[in-house]
Amino acid sequence: MKALYAGWLMLCSCLWAGTTHAASVVFLSPGAASDNYWQSYSRVMQTAADTTGMSLKILFTERDTRKLLDLARATLQGDERPDYLLFSNELNIAPEVLRMSVGSGVKLFAVNNTLTPDQIRILGDLPSRYPSFIGSLVGNDEEGGYLTAKRLISLAAPITDGQVIDMLAFSGTNTTPVSLLREKGMLRALAEHPEVHLRQIVLGGWRRDRALEQARVLFKRYPQTRLVWAANEQMAFGAMDALRERGGKPGQDVLFSAINGTSLSLQAQLNGSLSVVASGHFTLGGWAIILLHRYDTAQRQARQQIGARIIDVVHVVEPQDAQRFLNAARGEHYRLDIQAFNVQASGEASPFSLKGMLPPDHSSGDNRSGVTRRSPGSGPASAR
C-alpha cells in the first residue's frame, strides 16, 4: 500500500511539473495595438511563444511613458507576477523599470532598445545591483540606417561635376537608441557621398501625421529635394503624403527609403512609390522569446546571464524578393529556428535574416510549421 501511495505521489508530482512549468512572459510594447509594425512584431512573438510553450501576454503602452511605467509597476509588484518581463528602453525608462523590479522575483530582459552607455555608467555595476536583469537583444540598426541611405543614394539620377543632390531625413526621437543608431548609419553613408547635401534632419516621432506636417514645410523650403530617408515606414508615408499634396509623385520626383518592411512598405516598394525598404527588425521579439526559452530550460545551476546580444536582422529587401516577402508578411508566415543562436553566420546566410525565415516554396514539400528545428552544429536552414 505504501509503495502504491508513493508511486501515486510520484505520478502526481510529474504531472504537476509537466503542467505548471511553462514559463510566463509579459511584454510591454512601446507602441499601439493599431500600429502595423507592432502588430507584426507581436504576432512573431506569439509564434515563438506557441512553439516553445511559453505563456505570453502583450500590453500595449501607446508610447505613453506614464502608462508604460504604471503597467510595469503593476506587473512587477502585483499579486500575479510573470517569470519574465520584456521591455524596450524607449524614452529612457529602463532605470525606473530596474528599480521597480528589486525584490519582485521577476527576471528582466530588454529588447529593441537597451540601456544607453550613460545609463549604465550612472546605474553602476548592473549584475550586482540588479541581478534580475539578465540581458538584452537588439538589431543591427546602425547598419540598417547605412544600407538604406547607401542604396537610396545609388538610385539617384547621375549628376555632373559640381552639382549636388538635396536630401531630407526623418529620424525618430533623440532619446531612443534605435533612432540614434539608424541616424548614425545614415550619416556614415552621407560621409561617403559629398555630392549629397543633407538639407535638414527632423524628429518625426515615428508618426505619419507628424512627418506629414514637417514635410509640408520642408518641401516648400527645399523644393529641389530628390531624396528622403526615413527611420521607419510611417514617417516615409507621411512625407509621401506631403509630396502628393504638392502634385509630386513618390518614386519619380522624389525617391524614398524606409525601415520596417510591413506589408504596407512592401506593397509600396512593388508599386514603385517606396524605392528602398529594409526589413527584419520586427522579428526581434520572437528571437527574444527563443533566447528566454533557452535560458529558462537550462539547468538552474548552469544558468548564466544572457548578456547584451546584437543580431543581424535588418537587411535591404531586393526588388526581386519583394513579392515573396509581401506574401509572407500578409500571412505572418515566418520560421524561427530554435537553434539559431548556435549558428555563426552573417548577411543573408544568418539564421536571423528575414529571407531565411520565409516559408518554403509550395513545391518544396518542406516543413511548414512556425519553427525550424535542427541539431546543434548543423548548418543554417536553407531559404527556399
Image (cartoon, rainbow, N blue to C red):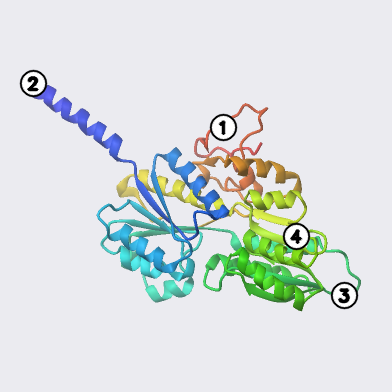
Image quarter hosting the N terminus = top left
On residue 368, the disc is 1
- Going by the numbered disc 1, the residue's amino acid type is Arg
378 w.r.t. 234: above or below: above
The Cα–Cα distance between marks 1 and 2, rounded to whole angstroms, is 50 Å
The answer to whether mark 4 and mark 2 are in CB contact below 8 A is: no
On residue 1, the disc is 2
1 or 4: tag closer to the N-terminus = 4
- Going by the numbered disc 4, the residue's amino acid type is Arg
Q: Is residue 227 left or right of residue 42?
A: right
The answer to whether mark 1 and mark 2 are in CB contact below 8 A is: no
3 or 1: tag closer to the N-terminus = 3
Numbered disc 4: secondary structure: helix
Residue drawn at x 33%, y 59% is 132
Image quarter hosting the C terminus = top right
Query: Foreground: 299 or 290?
Result: 290
- Going by the numbered disc 2, the residue's amino acid type is Met
Crowd around label 4: few <14 · some 14–19 · many ≥20 (10 Å): some
Provide residue 52's location: percent of width, then percent of height: 42, 40
Observer able to see residue 245: yes
Crowd around label 2: few <14 · some 14–19 · many ≥20 (10 Å): few
Query: Foreground: 308 or 202?
Result: 202
Residue drawn at x 71%, y 46% is 322
Residue drawn at x 26%, y 37% is 17
Q: Which residue is mark 4?
A: 151
Provide residue 336's location: percent of width, then percent of height: 53, 42
Numbered disc 3: secondary structure: loop
4 or 3: tag closer to the N-terminus = 4
